[in-house]
């Protein structure tokens, strides 16, 4: 795996509805491998690879957006109030660095709380709600905040730089789903020159309800679809064995069921057979929670047989995730092997 691609994707700014940066990176990466590239009216990007007639059309989907903050109010004192776009639990938020795109330039800040020194005993024990939190951008008044370029509707993401931790471990923001985007790019490139029919889609607004995938699948009208995701790895101290949904280094995570889909039997079987035949390590998602683009895709038109393969990532939907590069590599291999196997005339 090209670490540099993952680094660029992870560092890219891409809140739901503002996926321009990751979209640009994917376009750059696949310009030479795709027969045609198009962007739809909502912002999904399609990479078409036309193969031989008679082979099924397979849709791959990886979402480009990431969980984010949306500024809803600027206090007279210059502090920003916000709501989240996508699920971020408030217990990971206090003290985090945030970067917004203001009117002129990026605006940096930190999520603040009332200091513990003036909290009551009761307050110290409970979690903050999003409503109690605010972002401090270093502005002394509403006027100063506006002069910096702040406005209602401004979006921000965690301000975290991609880092290699050594031994193949990497840390960065937005691995859900930029790790999936990286694996999709890699698999797509590997299939250049093959006779198969592919449409790989960088989807928008997954984190707020699988929105881009719905319109993308209608347009792509595929015979089969595979969502490539970043899924939660819970192999951390404190998790009981049955709570460990997936673990780092265990290979791509194959979904049997989650809250949005029951994987289509043929897609599921083909994924397993492909992994076995090619000696690709894999694991099953053991805790059937969460949802992915496949949830929206499989209910499109008259129904599209779909499945999910995911990269195990710790701490997704928080400020930074930890993943292992081998898992991303093996996910790309599995996606490629799946396409070769399910493409029969
Ligand atoms: Co995701």
Image (tube, grey):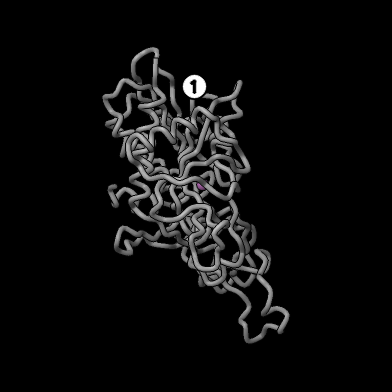
Q: Classify residue 126 as left or right of residue 172.
A: right
Quadrant where the C terminus is found in the figure: top left
Q: Classify residue 142 as left or right of residue 123.
A: left
Query: Which quadrant of the view contains residue 105?
Result: bottom left
Disc 1 designates what residue? 223
The x, y position of residue 183, in whole percent, is 37, 42
Name the foreground residue: 41 vs 225.
225
Name the foreground residue: 257 vs 142.
257
Image position of 120 with respect to 240: above or below: below
Q: Is residue 64 among the parts visible in the rendering?
A: no
Q: Classify residue 87 as left or right of residue 223.
A: right
The x, y position of residue 31, in whole percent, is 30, 33
What is the total number of numbered labels drawn onto the structure image?
Answer: 1
Image position of 151 with respect to 213: above or below: below
Residue shown at 59% from the left, 36% from the top: 262
Disc 1 on helix, strand or loop? loop
Q: What is the residue that sits farthest to the top in this orientation?
A: 53
Q: Is residue 292 among the parts visible in the rendering?
A: yes
């Amino acid at each position: 795996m090209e670490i540099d691609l993952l680094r660029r994707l992870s560092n890219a700014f891409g809140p739901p509805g503002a996926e321009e940066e990751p979209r640009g990176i994917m376009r750059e990466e696949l310009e030479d491998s795709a027969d045609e590239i198009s962007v739809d009216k909502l912002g999904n990007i399609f990479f078409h690879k036309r193969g031989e007639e008679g082979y099924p059309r397979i849709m791959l989907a990886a979402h480009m957006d990431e969980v984010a903050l949306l500024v809803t109010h600027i206090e007279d004192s210059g502090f920003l109030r916000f709501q989240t776009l996508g699920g971020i639990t408030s217990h990971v938020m206090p003290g985090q660095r945030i970067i917004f795109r203001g009117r002129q330039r990026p605006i940096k800040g930190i999520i603040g709380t009332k200091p513990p020194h003036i909290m009551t005993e009761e307050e110290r024990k409970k979690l903050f709600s999003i409503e109690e939190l605010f972002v401090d951008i270093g502005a002394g008044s509403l006027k100063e905040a506006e002069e910096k370029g702040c406005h209602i509707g401004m979006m921000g993401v965690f301000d975290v730089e991609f880092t290699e931790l050594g031994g193949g471990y990497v840390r960065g923001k937005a691995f859900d789903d930029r790790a999936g985007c990286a694996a999709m790019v890699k698999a797509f490139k590997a299939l250049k020159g093959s006779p198969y029919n592919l449409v790989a889609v960088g989807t928008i607004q997954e984190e707020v309800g699988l929105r881009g995938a719905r319109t993308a699948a209608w347009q792509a009208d595929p015979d089969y679809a595979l969502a490539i995701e970043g899924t939660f790895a819970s192999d951390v101290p404190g998790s009981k064995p049955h709570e460990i949904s997936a673990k780092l280094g265990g290979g791509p995570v194959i979904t049997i069921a989650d809250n949005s889909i029951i994987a289509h039997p043929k897609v599921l079987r083909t994924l397993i057979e492909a992994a076995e035949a090619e000696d690709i390590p894999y694991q099953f998602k053991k805790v059937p929670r969460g949802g992915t683009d496949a949830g929206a895709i499989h209910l499109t038109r008259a129904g599209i047989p779909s499945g999910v393969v995911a990269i195990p990532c710790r701490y997704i939907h928080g400020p930074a995730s930890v993943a292992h590069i081998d898992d991303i590599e093996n996910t790309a291999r599995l996606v490629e092997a799946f396409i070769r196997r399910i493409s029969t005339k």
